[in-house]
Every structure is written in structure tokens, then in C-alpha cells.
């Protein structure tokens, strides 16, 4: 409950300060005083206490409700004697400034107080109220009493000495030694003859140190004349005080002393006794008293300033006469002329609005009847019709006996501005809430309005695709359906974000092998990274549990987004190799462990301004990021939301032009019966020698192997390795195996190690690392193991070490590949071709086709990159996809043609579109944009060869021995191969049509890459099926179907096509059965690839 009077002390210098803040400032001015203070009514006969600060209440041990409202004289009558009560009553009656000392008698103690009474008056005259400040001077009184007692003892001793001269010296000696005061015996020259024990403590010296010293050497700034002048006019034994305060400097402080001197005689000799009394505590008390008086004066000034500046009015109401007593500010608040109004209760009633008077009076009467505090807010109307909001507070006042209520006193505060601000805030909040509801309603309506016709379109297209259509018509239907599904997927992304924003996203908790999940993420992004020349590395803390409880789907989504962004925004240049490093370590909070996953790159980096808006929805670092890299800007916002749902967090540290570092904190729970990790059994303590100049690969190998206490060393070449082996042998040490870096892989592949004629090498076991994605992992012979390191995965390294140490078995051996000659395709052709496609699998297929045909090619992932390469290179032909992020194929063609028009020396570079869109309108758009031809996917090798041969004639750099015939501008009518094998999962005839050969050296790398890709496709389809996301399922199935047909996996392609065509029906059990049949076919594919030594049979497919 707020005190009504303390509101007077608020700092109202700014009219914008809220009432709550005013109250706290007002109260703090008084509440922090160390002296007790009460403020009471100055009206004669009332003198009711308005306010008592905490120091006052604490002194009397009373709560506020037993003090507020009591008559001040009645209150003190319980503690003071009649004389002090009479003195206080007189001072209050006269209402003048008054200071006195009084004795307070309480049940448990008796104390002395210094009372200061100050009156505050209103401007027109008359008392408003009185302020009484009490300071506890009990300790000072006690010091004085002790001084008085000591003095009395001394006087008594002197008197006894006069009576008995013979006993004088003995008595004086006792008095001297046992006196509480500090006493020194001096001769006429003011040299010390003796000191008592108190004086020894005072000076912090022994008696032998003090005897014989001159007094001036002991006392700070003391003059001898002071003593001589005082003693010259007094009788023997009469004590006379010294005027000056004497200072004594000690080790840690300086004491203030009062001194007095007297003559004494001993054996007819006259001596001087100097008595020093420590008045430091008394001075502190006096200083405190002066400080309290100063504070009280400041409080009085603050009260006046606060009420004047803050618009706070003070009022009282006499229950007997019904009259009101207002100060000047009350009249200002109510807009009333004090000289022309009846200042009574009715006048106040007339000012309060009719709608508020009942509530205000009810609260007022309730406070009067229950003798409680009054608090209310109401509106008043000024004579000029202005409406103001008033906050009122008051306490009931009592007569001198403290039981009979005689009135009420309190304050009014004008809170109109605050009320208007609150009303505006409520209005804006209602507008914001309405806008939010409108957004949700808009999304829901748009979802329904778009989904309804689009689902009809997709459904009818599915039915149409099952009817009799030629190849071109099927392609058209597929393109239309893909476009519809893409649109639905975009809508789903936005609605999924809204779902997270609304808190409707749920998580599951299932066992997850974290290392496999992270490595699978790197596998997914490997092709994209390889195409950009980026190296992917993983370091994994061996102390992490093998299996944790988490949501594998959402965690995969988080990692794919973060690592995918690192790959997307990182490039390799001649000066610096692009690198992305993922690390997982075990850390500990105060109460629980957590996994810290760090994704670090040396990409484009960000500024502080870009980081600030990084996690905002629909936002990217800047607009140029969207133009260059595409994207909706939802990824990181969703990532942070998912991590927060998992109880985790994400932090980012980035420097523009240097790179970025994302740190994920992921709390986890271990499974109840965790499986044992056998890795330490076959890796711990290995001694390994690295032969490489690739410091990155050596560093990341070393970091991972440090978990297993492996001892490593690194040399630059095999000659140095032989020297190390020789040294180790002489020292009796053993090198378990040698790891050859990827930079030396091809060198030692072409030049066998036998060239070194070293028995030490013959005895060693080797692991060869390779960045070639087509390289198979496994034993090439008993002591050679080949391991791909792009991406670098710790599990593959530890497996390779275990195999080479013969601690685990390796059933997979890499078999020599037998070439099958094919004479249909010509070899050693010339020409440089620029290939533009945003889909990694498509780039992989076309690159293998062109290499087989004998052409050199360069890759670009979108039109802007291709345009840059075209302007800075010399290409004979451009093969481009039409639909790509950043810049599509149509815009690319327009830009190239515009450059050729401006610079005639560039000639005319043939541009051929290669896309899945077989609609006539698409081919027309290609020609209109400046392209020369149009091919549909998948392109057979023969068709591709014929098209290149035809359009190479228009190359700015003509090829030798090529017929010069005018090219046709009509697009080729290409049919997709439809032959299906009766048994084998891979249709080799289809692959032969696409690649032009069945040669394993060409086919095997493609199928190995497809094997990794199709496992990811199955996994993504399973996730979409689990989430019941028909749009995602259709999109995934569509992409997987095209990749399957390009790889000759016709049976799988058919399964994916069924998923694509039926996902919109949302028959989840039937879709699940279809996906299960696709998994069965995936098992057949695995067996086929293992049988042909294309993959290892130890590889685990998605379950």
C-alpha cells in the first residue's frame, strides 16, 4: 500500500515520467534517511501523522498502521515525561522551528533523542504540516556522562587530597594510574615525567619512550603558551580547559582530543597534570547531526520542488465540517479559482464525471468506514470542459487519542498523459493483433484457394499421363505437373514456417547415431562441394556417446541447412582453396552435457549489420545474396526455431571476406542401454606416418586420431618416409601404417612403391587417400587400402586403420576393371564446351558423356557464373539448362547475344538448351531468347554427338575437317528410352544409349554416385511420408525418377513415378507400400552393384 504523502517528494521535472516511477523516487528520498522522521498535520487539535519513515518505525518497533493517523503529542506521551511532553506540545502549538533533547523511555531501553521541528507553510500563509526529525544521541549522552563521572571522581580525589595532605601523593598516584582519561605529569618545562596506562594506549608507545620528551613533540600543532596562559590565572588544583582541539597522529589515524590542565604539588614541588579526552566519537556524532539537519533542510526543499514541478496536489478533508483544505496545486489541477469557490466536499463531487463519481465515492466511503487507505482513479471536468484523469490516495486521520477518525489527508496526481498513452498503446496493440489474425487468415485462405485448383490440375495431369501419349506429350505433361508441384512446395515452405511461428511444430525422440547422421549430411552435399572445388572435413569427439535420443529428421534438417549454406557461400579460387569444417565435441553445462557442433568456412563472411538480421524470417544478408545465391531467407529462421524447440541454441561469428563460424549447442539424453563403440579397440595407440604436402588433410587426420591417443608424424615425400622408418627400426619402434595424402595419390598410382627398392616399404601397410569421387574404397592388395577423402569422414579413416591392422575384416577388394571396346563413338575430338545446369546429377551425366565423346568441358551451376566464364574464356559451344536460380538459361542466352551484337569480333557461339521441358512453347522461348537448338532430357549419347557436330560449325573457333552446312533451327525430337530389363535392376542398354558404352570404367563411377544419391532420395521420401507432406514427396519422387532413368534404374524410376503421380491423393498406407516396394528394389540394386564390385557389400542402405 503506497503512502499518500511520499508522493509529494517525486521528481516531476519531466511530465512524461510515469506515476509509478514518481512514487518510487518520492519514497526513496525519505526512506533512505538514517534518522527517524515523521510528517504530521499542523492544524491545531489535529496534528495527525501523515508519514513515518522506516528509521522512525524501526526505533519504536511499530508497524506503519500503528503510527499513521495518530496525534503526534498522543504518540510521544507514551514515551516522554511530563516536562518533555509539555515542551513538545508548546513547540507544535507555536509551529516554529525548535530543537531540544528529550529522554525516551521504552519497555526494553531508555534513550536520548535530539528533536528538530520544522514547519512548512503554503504560499498564502498558514501551516500545511510539520516535519519532526529525531536523532539518537544516546551514545553521545553516555560519553558526556562518563566524562562527567570521571570529572567528579577527579574532583573528589582532589578534595580528599586537600583534607589529608599526607595521603595526597598516594591518592593522586592511584587517581593518575587508574583514570579512564589520558593523563600526563609534566614539569615546569612541559617535559613528560609520567604517564598513565590510558595515555600509553593513546600514544601507542611504552612509558620509557615517552618519559623526558617535550610535550610539543607528542601533540600535533600544539603551543606551550596555551598551557601557561591558562594556568596563570587559576588556583592550585583547579582544572582549566584548553581552548584548542588537540590532534594526536597515530599509526593508522589522527585523534581529536579535548585537553584540560591543573597545577598540583607534591613534596612542595609544583607540577602540571595534562588530561586528554578523546572526542572523536563525539565529533562524529556532531557531524552526523549536522548532516542530518542538512538532509532535513534538503528534504523540505525537495518537497516543495516536487509538489510544484510534479503537479501533485495535497488535500485534507474534515469529517466534522465537511470542508476541504487544498494547496495551490490542487486548485491548479481542478481549474478552480481559490478566491471564488466553496471549498467543500460538494464542490469536489461536482467536478467528478457522472460516470466515475459512484466508484470514487464508494472507495472513499469504504476507506472511511473501514479506516483503511483510500486509492482511486477517476475523471474530472474542468470549467472549460477539459477532461483530466486523477489518481488519488489518502489515509484516515485520528484525534489525539488515536481512536476517533476526524478526517482524511492525501494527494491528487494528474495522470491524464499516462492514461492517453495507455489508450494509444491498447489501440495499437489491437491493430497489431488484428493484422496478425488477418495474416493467418490470409495464409489459410490462400492455401485453400491455391491448393484446390492446383490439386485438381495435378490430379488430372496424373490421369492424363496414364493415357496414350507420345514422348513429347508425356514430357509436356511432366513439365506442367512439375511446375504445379513446385508451386505447392513453395506454399508448403511458407505454411511450415507459419506452423513453427504458431508453436504447432512437434518433435520426436528416437535413438540417433550422431556421427552417421553428420557424415550422411556431408555425403549429401559432397557433389555440390566437389563441383565448386570445396573440401569438406569432419572432426568427431570420440568421447561423445555413440547413440543419443533426438529427432533425427529435424536434426538432419538443421545440419543440411547450416552445412549447405557454408557450401553455398564458399568458393575456391586460385589463391585460396574453399574449405568447410564440421566438428562435433562433448561439452558440459552446469547441470547437463551437450553436443557442440561447429560449422566453419572460409567463404564470403558477413558484416555485423548482416549478422543482426541473419535469423529473421524472409531475410538474407542483403539483396545481392538473393540475386547471387537464391533462396527464400527462411532457412536460418527455421533452424533457430527447431534448435530452440530441442532446448538448444545457435551462435554465429563472422568476418566479412574471411568466413563464418556457426556454433550449435544441442542438449541430449543418452539411450538407456547404449551400444559399445568398437572403434577404440582397433585404433587406440596406433603409430602412423603421414606422407603428404596437404597440410589440411594431415591436420584433420591428426585431430581425429588424437581422440585415440595415436602417435603421428608427417613427412613430405616417400624418401623421407624411408628415413623415418629406418630411424624407427634402429630405435626399436614400430610404425603401424603409412597414410599417403591425396596430393600424392596419382603419383604413386602411376609409379609403384617398388621403384624405391626399399625393404622397409615392402614391410609396411599403406592407406592411400584420394579426392576422386569415383575412387572405390577397399583393398587393392594385401597391404594397400584406398580411401576417398572427399568428404573427409572419421569413420572411414578408423575403419581403414582397423582393416590394415587386421583387427577387423574387409570382404571387399577392388577388382581390376576390364574395358569393353566400342567403335561406334569417335575418339579424340576437339572443342571446349561450357555446360550450365544447377542439378549435380545432370552435370555429372553430361560431363561423362562429353568426356567419352572426346570433348573438354567446364561446368557452371547457374547463368551468371556461366556468363562470367564465357566472357573470360573461349568456348566452342554452350549447353545450358533453362530453369536455374540466380540467372536462367533464357537470360544467359540474351546476355551472350547482346555482347556479340556489341562486339562483332566475338562471332556467334552456338547455344543449345538441354532441359526436361518438351513443350512447344518452351522450344519457342529458347529460340526467341537467342538459343540455336533445344534437346530434352535424358539425352542419348548419339543424339548429343550429332547435335554437337552440327552446331560446332558455327563456333567462333572453327573445328578442323567439319562439314560446313547450315544448321537447322528446328529442335530435335528426342524420345526417352523406355526399354526395361526383365530381371536386372540396371538396364545396361539404356545406359549404353545415354553414355554410348557399357565400359565399366565409365559406368561404374556413375552408378556408384547414383547409389549414394538414391539412398538419400529414399531417406528424404521416407521423411516426407512420415511428415505426410504430399508436396515434398511429389518433388522428391520427381527428382529421384529423373536420376533413376539417367542411371538406367528403370524399375526404381517406375516406383518413384508412381509416388510422384499418387502423392497428391494422400493415401498414406498405399504410398507407404509403394515406398516399401522401392526399398525392396533398392536391395536388389545393392546386390547387383556389389556383385559387379561397384560398391562394398558392407555399405548400409537406408532402412
Image (tube, rainbow, N blue to C red):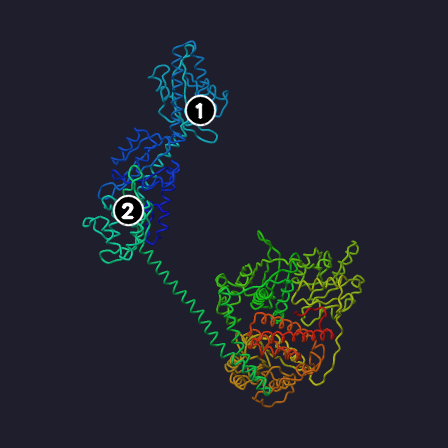
Which x, y percent locates residue 992? 69, 82
User: Which residue ends up furthest to the front in the rendered image?
Assistant: 369
How many marks are shown on the rendered structure?
Answer: 2
Give the percent coordinates (x, y) of residue 478: 57, 82
Q: Which mark is residue 218?
A: 1
Dot 2 or dot 1: first in sequence order is 1
Q: Quadrant of residue 657?
A: bottom right
Q: Nearer the viewer, residue 524 or 1083?
A: 1083
Label ID, residue 946 = none
563 relative position to 111: left or right? right
Residue in the foreground of this view, choosing between 192 and 82? 82
Q: Where is residue 766 shown, x and y percent of the image?
A: 75, 64
Mark 2 or mark 1: which is in front? Answer: 2
Farthest residue to the left: give it. Answer: 340
Residue 722 seen: yes
- Looking at the rendered structure, the secondary structure element under dot 1 is helix
Local secondary structure at mark 2:
strand
Q: Residues within 10 Å of mark 2 (few under 14, many from 20)?
A: many
Can you tell which mark lies on residue 314?
2
At a point 23% along the width and 41% down the height, the residue shown is: 126
Which quarter of the picture shows residue 809?
Answer: bottom right
Amino acid at each position: 500500500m503506497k503512502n499518500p504523502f511520499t508522493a509529494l517528494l517525486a521528481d516531476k521535472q519531466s511530465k512524461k515520467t510515469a506515476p509509478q516511477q514518481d512514487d518510487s523516487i518520492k519514497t526513496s528520498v525519505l526512506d533512505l534517511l538514517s534518522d527517524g522522521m515523521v510528517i504530521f498535520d499542523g492544524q491545531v487539535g489535529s496534528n495527525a501523522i501523515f508519514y513515518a519513515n522506516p528509521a522512525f518505525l524501526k526505533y519504536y518497533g511499530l508497524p506503519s498502521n500503528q503510527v499513521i493517523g495518530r496525534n503526534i503529542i498522543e504518540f510521544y506521551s507514551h514515551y516522554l515525561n511530563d516536562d518533555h511532553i509539555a515542551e513538545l506540545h508548546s513547540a507544535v502549538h507555536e509551529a516554529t522551528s525548535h530543537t531540544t533533547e528529550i529522554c525516551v523511555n521504552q519497555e526494553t531501553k531508555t534513550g536520548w533523542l535530539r528533536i528538530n521541528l520544522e514547519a512548512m507553510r503554503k504560499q498564502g500563509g498558514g501551516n500545511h504540516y510539520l516535519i519532526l526529525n529525531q536523532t539518537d544521541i544516546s551514545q553521545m549522552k553516555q560519553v558526556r556522562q562518563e566524562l562527567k563521572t570521571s570529572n567528579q571522581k577527579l574532583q573528589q580525589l582532589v578534595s580528599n587530597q586537600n583534607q589529608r595532605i599526607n595521603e595526597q601523593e598516594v591518592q593522586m598516584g592511584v587517581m593518575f594510574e587508574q583514570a579512564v582519561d589520558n593523563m600526563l605529569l609534566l614539569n615546569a618545562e612541559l617535559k613528560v615525567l609520567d604517564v598513565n596506562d590510558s595515555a600509553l594506549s593513546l600514544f601507542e608507545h611504552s612509558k620509557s619512550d615517552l618519559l623526558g620528551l617535550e610535550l610539543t613533540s607528542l601533540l600535533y600543532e600544539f603551543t606551550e603558551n596555551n598551557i601557561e596562559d591558562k594556568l596563570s590565572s587559576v588556583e592550585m588544583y583547579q582544572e582549566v580547559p584548553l581552548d584548542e582541539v588537540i590532534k594526536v597522529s597515530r599509526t593508522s589515524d589522527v585523534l581529536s582530543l579535548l585537553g584540560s590542565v591543573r597545577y598540583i604539588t607534591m613534596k612542595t614541588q609544583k607540577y602540571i597534570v595534562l588530561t586528554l579526552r578523546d572526542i572523536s566519537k563525539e565529533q562524529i556524532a556532531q557531524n552526523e547531526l549536522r548532516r542530518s539537519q542538512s538532509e532535513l533542510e534538503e528534504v523540505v526543499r525537495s518537497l516543495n520542488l516536487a509538489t510544484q514541478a510534479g503537479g501533485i496536489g495535497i488535500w485534507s478533508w474534515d469529517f466534522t465540517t465537511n470542508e476541504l483544505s487544498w494547496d495551490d496545486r490542487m486548485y491548479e489541477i481542478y481549474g478552480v479559482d481559490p478566491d471564488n469557490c466553496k471549498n467543500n466536499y460538494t464542490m469536489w463531487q461536482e467536478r467528478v464525471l457522472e460516470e466515475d463519481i459512484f466508484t470514487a465515492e464508494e472507495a472513499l466511503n469504504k476507506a472511511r468506514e473501514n479506516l483503511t487507505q483510500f486509492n482511486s482513479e477517476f475523471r474530472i471536468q474542468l470549467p472549460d470542459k477539459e477532461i483530466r484523469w486523477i489518481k488519488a490516495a489518502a489515509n484516515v486521520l485520528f484525534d489525539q487519542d488515536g481512536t476517533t477518525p476526524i478526517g482524511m489527508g492525501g494527494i491528487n496526481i494528474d495522470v491524464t498523459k499516462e492514461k492517453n498513452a495507455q489508450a494509444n498503446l491498447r489501440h495499437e496493440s489491437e491493430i497489431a493483433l488484428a493484422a496478425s489474425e488477418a495474416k493467418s487468415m490470409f495464409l489459410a485462405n490462400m492455401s485453400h484457394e491455391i491448393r484446390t485448383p492446383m490439386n485438381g490440375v495435378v490430379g488430372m495431369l496424373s490421369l492424363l499421363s496414364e493415357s496414350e501419349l507420345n514422348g513429347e506429350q508425356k514430357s509436356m505433361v511432366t513439365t506442367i505437373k512439375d511446375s504445379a508441384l513446385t508451386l505447392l512446395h513453395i506454399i508448403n515452405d511458407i505454411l511450415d514456417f507459419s506452423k513453427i511461428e504458431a508453436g504447432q511444430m512437434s518433435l520426436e525422440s528416437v535413438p540417433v547415431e550422431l556421427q552417421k547422421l553428420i557424415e550422411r549430411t556431408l555425403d549429401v552435399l559432397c557433389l555440390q562441394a566437389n563441383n565448386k572445388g570445396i573440401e569438406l572435413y569432419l572432426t568427431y569427439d570420440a568421447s561423445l556417446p555413440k547413440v543419443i535420443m533426438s529427432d533425427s529428421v529435424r536434426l538432419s534438417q538443421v545440419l543440411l541447412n547450416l552445412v549447405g549454406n557454408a557450401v553455398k557461400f564458399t568458393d575456391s579460387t586460385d589463391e585460396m582453396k574453399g574449405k568447410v569444417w564440421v566438428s562435433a565435441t562433448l561439452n558440459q553445462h552446469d547441470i547437463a552435457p551437450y553436443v557442440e557442433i561447429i560449422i566453419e568456412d572460409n567463404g564470403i563472411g558477413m558484416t555485423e549489420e548482416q549478422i543482426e538480421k541473419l535469423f529473421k524470417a524472409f531475410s538474407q544478408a542483403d539483396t545481392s545474396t538473393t540475386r547471387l545465391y537464391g533462396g527464400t531467407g527462411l532457412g536460418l529462421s527455421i533452424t533457430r526455431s527447431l534448435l530452440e524447440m530441442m532446448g538448444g541454441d545457435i551462435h554465429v561469428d563472422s568476418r566479412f571476406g574471411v568466413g563464418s563460424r556457426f556454433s550449435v549447442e544441442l542438449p541430449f539424453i543418452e539411450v538407456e542401454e547404449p551400444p559399445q563403440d568398437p572403434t577404440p579397440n582397433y585404433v587406440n595407440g596406433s603409430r602412423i606416418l603421414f606422407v603428404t604436402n596437404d597440410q589440411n588433410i594431415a591436420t584433420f587426420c591428426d585431430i581425429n586420431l588424437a581422440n585415440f591417443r595415436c602417435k603421428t608424424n608427417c613427412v613430405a615425400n616417400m624418401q623421407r618416409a624411408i628415413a623415418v622408418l629406418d630411424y624407427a627400426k634402429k630405435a626399436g619402434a614400430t610404425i603401424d601404417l603409412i597414410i599417403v595424402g591425396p596430393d600424392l595419390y596419382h603419383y604413386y598410382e602411376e609409379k609403384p612403391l617398388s621403384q624405391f627398392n626399399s625393404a622397409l616399404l615392402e614391410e609396411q601397410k599403406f592407406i592411400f587417400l584420394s579426392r576422386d569421387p569415383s575412387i572405390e574404397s577397399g583393398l587393392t592388395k594385401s597391404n594397400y587400402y584406398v580411401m576417398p577423402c572427399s568428404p573427409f569422414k572419421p569413420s572411414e579413416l578408423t575403419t581403414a586403420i582397423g582393416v590394415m591392422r587386421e583387427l577387423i575384416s574387409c570382404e571387399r577388394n577392388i577388382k581390376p576393371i576390364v574395358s569393353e571396346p566400342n567403335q561406334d563413338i569417335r575418339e579424340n575430338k576437339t572443342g571446349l564446351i561450357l555446360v550450365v545446369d544447377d542439378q549435380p546429377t545432370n552435370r555429372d551425366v553430361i560431363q561423362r558423356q562429353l568426356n567419352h565423346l572426346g570433348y573438354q568441358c567446364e561446368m557452371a551451376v547457374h547463368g551468371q557464373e556461366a556468363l562470367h566464364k564465357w566472357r573470360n574464356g573461349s568456348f566452342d559451344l554452350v549447353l545450358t539448362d533453362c530453369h536455374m536460380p540466380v540467372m536462367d538459361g533464357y537470360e544467359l542466352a540474351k546476355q551472350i547475344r547482346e555482347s556479340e551484337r556489341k562486339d562483332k569480333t566475338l562471332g556467334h557461339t552456338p547455344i543449345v538448351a538441354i532441359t526436361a521441358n518438351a513443350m512447344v512453347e518452351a522450344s519457342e522461348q529458347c529460340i526467341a531468347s537467342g538459343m540455336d537448338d533445344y534437346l530434352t532430357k535424358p539425352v542419348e549419347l548419339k543424339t548429343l554427338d550429332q547435335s554437337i557436330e552440327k552446331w560446332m560449325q558455327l563456333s567462333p573457333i572453327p573445328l578442323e575437317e567439319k562439314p560446313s552446312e547450315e544448321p537447322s533451327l528446328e529442335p530435335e525430337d528426342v524420345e526417352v528410352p523406355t526399354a526395361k530389363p526383365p530381371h536386372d535392376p540396371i538396364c545396361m542398354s539404356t545406359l549404353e544409349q545415354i553414355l554410348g558404352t557399357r565400359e565399366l570404367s565409365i559406368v561404374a563411377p556413375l552408378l556408384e554416385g547414383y547409389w549414394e544419391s538414391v539412398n538419400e532420395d529414399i531417406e528424404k521420401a521416407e521423411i516426407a511420408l512420415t511428415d505426410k507432406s504430399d508436396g515434398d514427396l511429389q518433388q522428391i519422387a520427381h527428382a529421384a525418377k529423373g536420376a533413376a532413368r539417367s542411371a538406367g534404374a528403370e524399375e526404381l524410376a517406375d516406383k518413384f513415378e508412381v509416388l510422384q503421380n499418387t502423392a497428391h491423393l494422400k493415401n498414406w498406407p498405399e504410398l507407404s507400400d509403394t515406398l516399401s516396394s522401392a526399398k525392396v528394389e533398392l536391395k536388389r540394386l545393392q546386390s547387383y552393384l556389389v556383385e559387379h564390385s561397384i560398391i562394398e557389400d558392407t555399405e548400409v542402405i537406408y532402412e
